[in-house]
């Protein structure tokens, strides 16, 4: 099983990215665009919609190799959404350079956009971060982040899709 393992990339990375099939599910109905109804699909359905690489991370809790993803060092303004269901998850305004090789944020877009649970795999005790809408595996959250939260949401690029936003968001903030 690739569960929890670092996934070795084969071929070029851009080809491995998901075409965000979740676009078909967005915008969510009821509760606004952040919090639509739960998205529940079988593993077979997810595998049919996602690339094997994306499915291996977002549905089977794999971890992309550090510095391999599109968003590790991106400073492009915008909103990061779930690659599986399109829910808005993180803002570029809370993204920072952790040096880890994975996109890092000090808080989710809203308190309800992500969920967490204890992950005791691989002899470690970590806190897994998931999409609250479709339960996609996003990454883990650690307590060594910057102020004001001192949290580090360490997220796989391949679990995210960036919707670029206005440049003014970060320049006038
Ligand atoms: Fe999702």
Image (cartoon, helix red, strand yellow):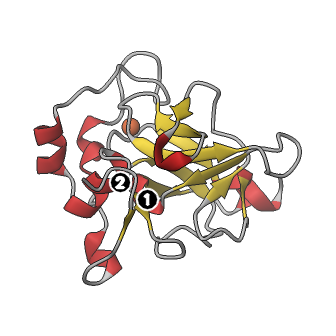
Q: Nearer the viewer, residue 91 or 130?
A: 130
Callout 1: helix, strand or loop? Answer: strand
Q: Is residue 50 left or right of residue 78?
A: left
Q: Nearer the viewer, residue 118 or 16?
A: 118
Measured in 3D between alpha carbons, the distance from the residue under mark 1 to the one under mark 2, in whole angstroms, is 6 Å
Task: Tell me where residue 20 appears, x and y as whole percent.
Answer: 30, 53
Task: Tell me where residue 23 appears, x and y as whole percent.
Answer: 29, 45
Q: Residue 57 bears which disc, if any?
A: 2
Q: At 40% from the left edge and 23% from the top edge, which residue is drawn? A: 36
Reading the image, the residue beneath label 1 is: 63
Q: Quadrant of ligand 1?
A: top left
**Residue 147, relative to residue 112: is it above or below?**
below
Task: Tell me where residue 9 appears, x and y as whole percent.
Answer: 32, 76
Query: Badge 2: few (under 14), some or many (20 or more) residues near its Cα, within 10 Å?
Result: many
Q: Tell me whether the residue at label 1 lies in contact with that at label 2, contact meaning CB atoms closer than 8 angstroms.
A: yes
Q: At 47% from the left edge and 43% from the top edge, which residue is drawn? A: 121
**Residue 114 visible within the image:** no
In terms of sequence position, does the residue under pointer 1 or pointer 2 come before the other? 2
Residue 107 found in image quarter: top right
Q: At 77% from the left edge and 44% from the top edge, which residue is drawn? A: 143
Residue 39 found in image quarter: top left
């Amino acid at each position: 099983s690739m569960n929890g393992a670092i996934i070795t990339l084969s071929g070029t990375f851009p080809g491995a990215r998901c075409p965000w099939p979740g676009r078909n599910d967005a915008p969510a109905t009821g509760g606004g665009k952040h919090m639509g109804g739960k998205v529940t699909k079988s593993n077979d359905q997810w595998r049919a919609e996602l690339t094997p690489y994306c499915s291996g991370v977002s549905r089977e809790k794999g971890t992309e190799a550090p510095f391999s993803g599109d968003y590790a060092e991106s400073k492009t303004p915008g909103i990061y959404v779930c690659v599986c269901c399109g829910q808005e998850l993180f803002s570029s305004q809370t993204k920072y350079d952790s040096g880890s090789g994975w996109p890092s944020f000090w808080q989710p877009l809203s308190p309800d956009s992500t969920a967490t649970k204890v992950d005791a795999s691989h002899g470690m005790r970590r806190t897994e971060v998931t999409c609250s809408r479709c339960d996609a595996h996003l990454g883990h959250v650690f307590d060594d982040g910057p102020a004001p939260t001192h949290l580090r949401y360490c997220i796989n690029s391949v679990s995210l899709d960036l919707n670029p936003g206005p440049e003014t968001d970060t320049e006038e903030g």
